[in-house]
C-alpha cells in the first residue's frame, strides 16, 4: 500500500505492508493503525511471529488484537518481547499494587477518566516508555469509549521547513505534576512526580524519522523563550493535532481487545462519552530510551 501525499505541501512516499510472513493486517486508516487477526497472545509466539509484530508496529504505529484471553502474566509476557516493563510513577511506593500493571477503570463514580486529553504516556520520565499495551476486558454497554491515536511523524512533516528548523533547536519541560496532581488529584510519591526536559523535535531510534514531541498532557513550557512565546508555540503544536483528522485513527474497543502503540511517535486520547456506564482494562508499558535530539 503506497501513501503518496499527506497535504499539498508535504509529499510523503513510503510503502506500508499489509502482508507479513505469519499474518496479514487490516489497516484502520491509511497512515496509522492496523488490526492483526489470527494470533493468540496467550500462547508462546515464534521468533518469526515476534519479528513480524515488531515490523508491523514500526510500519503502522498502532496494532489491534481482537478476541484475546489473557491473564496478567500472559499480558506481561507479551510486553516483555519488546523490552523491560515500566513502573508507573503512581505506583512508586505502593506495595498493594502490581508495579507493572496500570489499571484503567472508569465508572459512574469516577471523577475523571485516564487519558481524556491528547498525551504521550509518562513523557515526564527521563526515559519515557517506548510503547504501551492496553488490554480492555469490559466496554460500555451503550458503545463508545474509543481511543484516538495520532501520527506524530506526520504532524512534524506538516510543519513548514522554517518552522521545523526553528523547533529543532528547542527543548521543553514535561512535568508529571500537571496531570497526576492537577487533573487526577493523586498524592505524589516521596520526592514528587518526575519532571524532565526533552527535545521539541526528536528522532525515532528505530525508523530514524523526525517526531514532534510535545503534548498537552505533560508539556508545561518551552525552555529559553518568553512565557508568552512558549504558550504560542505549544498552542500551535497542540492545535495542529486537534484540527487535522488525517493524523488520526480511531480504535473501537470490543471486550478482550489488546491495543499496543508506539509511544515515541504517537499521541492518544481516551473518549469519555459513555457516562454513567463503565470501562475496564489493564496496561503494561515498556521502558524505552531517552528521546534523542535530532
Image (tube, helix red, strand yellow):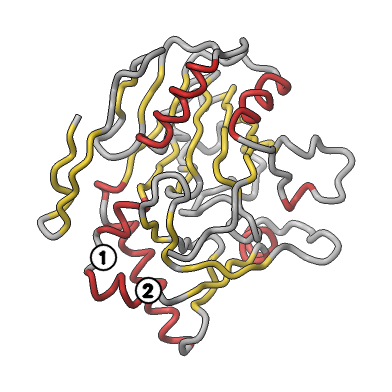
Q: Identify the residue position indicated by label 1 in the image.
A: 159
* Quadrant hosting residue 248: top left
Res 228 → quadrant:
bottom left
Of 27 and 2, the residue lying toward us: 2
Q: Residue at x 74, y 37 (%)?
A: 100
Mark 1 lies on a secondary structure that is loop
Q: Which labelled disc corresponds to residue 167?
A: 2
Number of numbered discs? 2
Residue 278 seen: no
Secondary structure found at label 2 = helix
Measured from the top left, where is residue 26 in percent x and y?
31, 21
Say which residue appears at 75% left-offset and 51% top-offset.
90
Few, some or many residues within 10 Å of mark 1 (<14, 14–19, 20+): some
**In the current view of this chain or complex, which residue is farthest to the left?**
8
Residue 180 image-quadrant placement? bottom right
Earlier residue among tags 1 and 2: 1
Amino acid at each position: 500500500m503506497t501513501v503518496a501525499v499527506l497535504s499539498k505541501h508535504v509529499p510523503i512516499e513510503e510503502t506500508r505492508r499489509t502482508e507479513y510472513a505469519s499474518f496479514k493486517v487490516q489497516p484502520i486508516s491509511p497512515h496509522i493503525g492496523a488490526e492483526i487477526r489470527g494470533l493468540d497472545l496467550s500462547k508462546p509466539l515464534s521468533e518469526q511471529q515476534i519479528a513480524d509484530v515488531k515490523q508491523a508496529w514500526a510500519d503502522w504505529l498502532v496494532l489491534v488484537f481482537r478476541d484475546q484471553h489473557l491473564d496478567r502474566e500472559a499480558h506481561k509476557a507479551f510486553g516483555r518481547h519488546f523490552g523491560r516493563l515500566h513502573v508507573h510513577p503512581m505506583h512508586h511506593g505502593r506495595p498493594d499494587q502490581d508495579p507493572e500493571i496500570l489499571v484503567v477503570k472508569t465508572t459512574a463514580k469516577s471523577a475523571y477518566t485516564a487519558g481524556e486529553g491528547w498525551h504521550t504516556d509518562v513523557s515526564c520520565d527521563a526515559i519515557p516508555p517506548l510503547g504501551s499495551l492496553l488490554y480492555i476486558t469490559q466496554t460500555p454497554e451503550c458503545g463508545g469509549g474509543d481511543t484516538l491515536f495520532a501520527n506524530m511523524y506526520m504532524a512534524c512533516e506538516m510543519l513548514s521547513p522554517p518552522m521545523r528548523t526553528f523547533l529543532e533547536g528547542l527543548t521543553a519541560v514535561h512535568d508529571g505534576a500537571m496531570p497526576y496532581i492537577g487533573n487526577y488529584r493523586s498524592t505524589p510519591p516521596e520526592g514528587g512526580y518526575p519532571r524532565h526536559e526533552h527535545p521539541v523535535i526528536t528522532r525515532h531510534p528505530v525508523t530514524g524519522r523526525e517526531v514532534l514531541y510535545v503534548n498537552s498532557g505533560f508539556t508545561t513550557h518551552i525552555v529559553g523563550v518568553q512565557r508568552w512565546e512558549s504558550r504560542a508555540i505549544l498552542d500551535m503544536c497542540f492545535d495542529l493535532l486537534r484540527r487535522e483528522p488525517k493524523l488520526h485513527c480511531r480504535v473501537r474497543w470490543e471486550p478482550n481487545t489488546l491495543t499496543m502503540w508506539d509511544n515515541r511517535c504517537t499521541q492518544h486520547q481516551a473518549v469519555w462519552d459513555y457516562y454513567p456506564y463503565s470501562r475496564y482494562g489493564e496496561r503494561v508499558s515498556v521502558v524505552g530510551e531517552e528521546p534523542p535530539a535530532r
